[in-house]
Amino acid sequence: MAEVRINSVSKLFGEVKAVDNFNAVIRDGEFVSILGPSGCGKTTMLRMIAGFEKPSLGEIYIGEQLVSSAAKSLFVPPEKRNIGMVFQSYAVWPHMTVFDNVAYPLKIKGYSKNDIKSKTDKALELVHLDGYAARIPSQLSGGQQQRVALARALVSEPKLLLLDEPLSNLDAKLRESMRFEIKDLQKKLKITVIYVTHDQGEAMAMSDRIVVMNKGVIQQIGTPTDVYETPANRIIADFIGLVNFLPGEIKDGMATIPGLGLSLAAPEVPAGAATVAIRPENITIGRAGGRLSGTLVHKFYLGDAVDWRVEAGGFILRVIDKGMEHDDYRLGDTVSLDIKKYLVFPGQP
Amino acid sequence: MINRARLMSLDAKWAVIIVAVSVLVVFTVIPMLYLIFRSMLVDGALDLTTYREVYSNLVNWKAFINTFKISLIVTLLSVIISFPLAWLVGRTDLPGKGFFRTVFIASYMIPPYVGAIAWTQLLNPNAGYLNEWLVHTFNLASSPFDIYGMGGLIWCLTLFHSPFAFITISRALEKMDPSLEEASRVSGASPLRTLWNVTLPLMFPSIFAGGVLVFIGVGSAFGIPAIVGMPAQIEVLTTRIVTYVYLGTGKGIKDATALAVSLMLAANFILYASTWLIAGKDYVTIGGKSTRPGLVELGVWKWPLFGLVSLYGLFAVFLPLGSIVVTSLIKSLSRPIALDNLSFATWLAALKNDQYMEPLWNSFVAAAITATLATVIALFIAYLLIKTKVSGRTLPDSLSTLGGATPSIVIALALIITFSGEFGLNLYSTLAILVIGYMVKYLTMAVRTIAASLSQVHPSLEEAALNSGASWLRSLKDIMLPLIAPSIVAGWFLVFMPSFYELTMSIILYGAKTKTIGVLLYELQTYADPQDASVLAVIVLLIVLIGNIILRKVSKGAVGI
Ligand SMILES: Nc1ncnc2c1ncn2[C@@H]1O[C@H](COP(=O)(O)OP(=O)(O)OP(=O)(O)O)[C@@H](O)[C@H]1O
Ligand SMILES: [Mg+2]
């Protein structure tokens, strides 16, 4: 059982509150990403789970074991937490062969020679590095080094795997394929994974749930669909995916955008200033029959889609269209826009 | 337009290469070759009799063995002390570690002979401060320690040469990606096991390099062996060489050359062999974005270790400095240290004494001229090395490195035999020969500093200037100089400071009118005038300290040797 429970954990570095009242339960076998902009405290939170930092406040449980408690001054050092960890810089030891790198946790734990050999070979096979055992790390590519790190983290069969931006040093193609490899491994081994990233694509593709952080504070915990389709606030809407923000006003449960002549139902938002958020792919362009009319001012051809800028009522809206016959449209054309989905948040943009 | 600019720049570059190479060849290569040549020549024929004769003299043979033995012991001690110190200060929650780090790094700037002078004040068998204190505190019958002897020699050499190991090792430790160690911790290894399995092996190349630095430094050292060893009849190669030169006879010089060549060959062999040995093993630079290292908690060991580190700081820095300052202020050496026994009388007398102020001024002038010349030459050498693809661009740099790697005493001896009129150039006992000596030895410091900063300047900046029609020299002046100005200032001070307090070369190269502060201090020490020596030592330390503060300011803490 490797459920991770984080109760009201805060971490202060002097005056800086790197993590502020973090509460989360990560279930056994779950893949959870911690997502947020640079400096928001993701690494700090992960390092507290690993045992490299002590929480200033709060408690952390791994499985049934209390591993950190500020109030009880209890702290289990990283070597006693029985976790696997993969670092952004690979942290593969350059003075050891691939085999020795991967076998290291087993040697430390005092396994027999035969066990070490068979378990290490198995781990190398798992990450598709069989045949590389005798190499030294400087003879490996970045992607292969990261696989060594992965094998080393998994070799002693931990119940919990922590990864801190493990793919950010790899090129785009490799990053993409490694995502699926990691996800595959997790499913195969049924381990709990906590994965830190600032790449929303990564988080969306791999996670069961995403913890979105900003400035040390959790903004939302939810499935990828949740955080994308119903972001809890403007910060998340802005951070995850693309979005048009329009200033509006709420009156009698309706959001109106002055200048645009648009009214949208928003029964749950309190009266007053509001922000209407519309994702570019939720606006469609047509000749007629839409709710708005606008003028096409820019066109960026992306291959699989067209990224338009449309002027409407003094606003420039971004519209991404994947299916339309874009050749029929010319810049300067007056078009009709329809809105498929939108969100309304209280307060000015 | 562009073509002409390119053509001219090529000419200017060639001119610069030729000038730089000839200066280095004339003052580094020729003197050293001539030194070797002279040592192997008897009556116009190649002959190794001089070597046989020199080493059949037991004193010289012992000096050779001593040099090797002492260097080895001091190197081992330095490494054994420096690695744990660097680790404690860089990776643990040792109280006051920032302070200790600054102190240990800064202690490189205590000239070794000043350290030796201080320890003779603390531990001479007659009235050493520390000896007296021990006798009083523990009711001993006699002084427990005598600084003059093998033990004292090794003690002083270790204290004042190990900063170079400490600096090398702690820099490397700071550059090492801490996740390498953290990966070992999550693998289940305790902090100590991690230290043993990961940190130590990864640091080995740097530890080795630091050790080599100490080994060669100690083997070439003259100040400490002369002050602490010679009174106890312990001789090393450098002291033997100086003794032979001071004989002033042709035979004396000849014997000195044989010893110097042995020293030079040994030093260069060790340097190049070690570079070759650890080539490609510099693990430390491997690794990505560094995180802040998690600190190892020392737990119950925290305060005992704090005590040990403090004690080392006390021996390496605070006691010696305190001793020098107190001695410079004391009224009567026969009375105990107390407030009513302190005054500025020695200071005032020393400051008015022309025989003291003149050497101080000489050193200042010689060091300033050296630093200025060296910075200009270094600028061109570094430029060639980093910014051009001209073939032969590495030659001036290699020559300056060779100078820096050659023991000072060898450089001095080579210069003196080459430029005493033998080849029409007589620089004997002029300021010029001091400047040349300092330059050969310390030029590489300026080259390294400026080259490092030049390599940070993106080539496009200069190309833009060239494309707008500026000549090469013009673009150097308008674009490069302002960008690398801080490193030029830093390079200047890195040459100025060691030149200013230089002793080993000066003791051979100085003349009646060009005595330097290092030589004066050495004389005062040997003629047993500890108080005046202390005043001057404090002045030297103050000047070096100010130089270092300026250095840290301009380089924003990046340089400080
Ligand atoms: N050891 C430390 N001492 C002081 N401040 C720290 C320390 N570690 C982190 N911080 C600060 O805490 C905040 C959060 O840092 P953290 O490394 O957790 O961010 P992050 O979300 O991982 O960012 P990134 O995406 O850039 O890796 C930052 O403001 C950082 O400067
Ligand atoms: Mg981070």
Image (spheres, coloured by chain):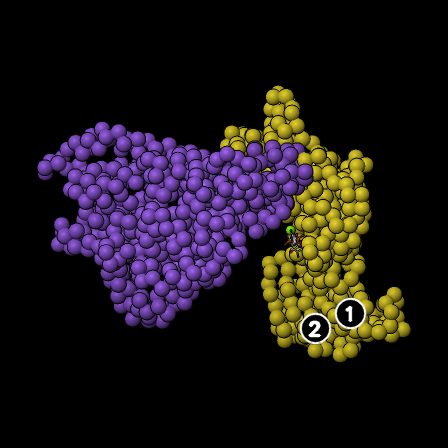
Chain colours: A yellow, B purple
Q: Nearer the viewer, mark 1 or mark 2?
A: 1
In front of the other: B456 or B123: B123
The chain letter under disc 1 is A
Task: Left or right? Give the position of B68 relative to A286.
Answer: left
Q: Secondary structure at mark 1?
A: strand
- Determine crowd level at label 2: few under 14, some 14-19, many 20+ residues with C-alpha closer than 10 A: many
Instruction: Give left or right: position of B525 versus B103.
Output: left
Q: At x 35% / y 68%, what residue is drawn?
A: B477
Task: Looking at this view, name the residue that lies furthest to the right.
Answer: A252
Name the image quarter holding the N terminus of chain B. Answer: bottom left
Q: Which residue is mark 2?
A: A335
The residue labelled by disc 1 is: A275
Labelled disc at residue B351: none
Residue drawn where x is 47% and y is 59% of the image: B343
Tag 1 and tag 2, C-beta contact below 8 Å: no
Left or right of A291? Residue B366 is: left
What residue type is disc 1 on? Thr
- The answer to which of B428 and A69 lies nearer the viewer is B428
Q: Looking at numbered disc 2 in the image, what kind of residue is underneath it?
A: Val
User: In the figure, B175 relative to A39: above or below?
Assistant: above
Among the 4 quarters of the image, the one containing residue A101:
top right
Can residue A282 be seen here? The reply is: no
State the image coordinates of residue A193 (x, y, percent, origin top left): 72, 41
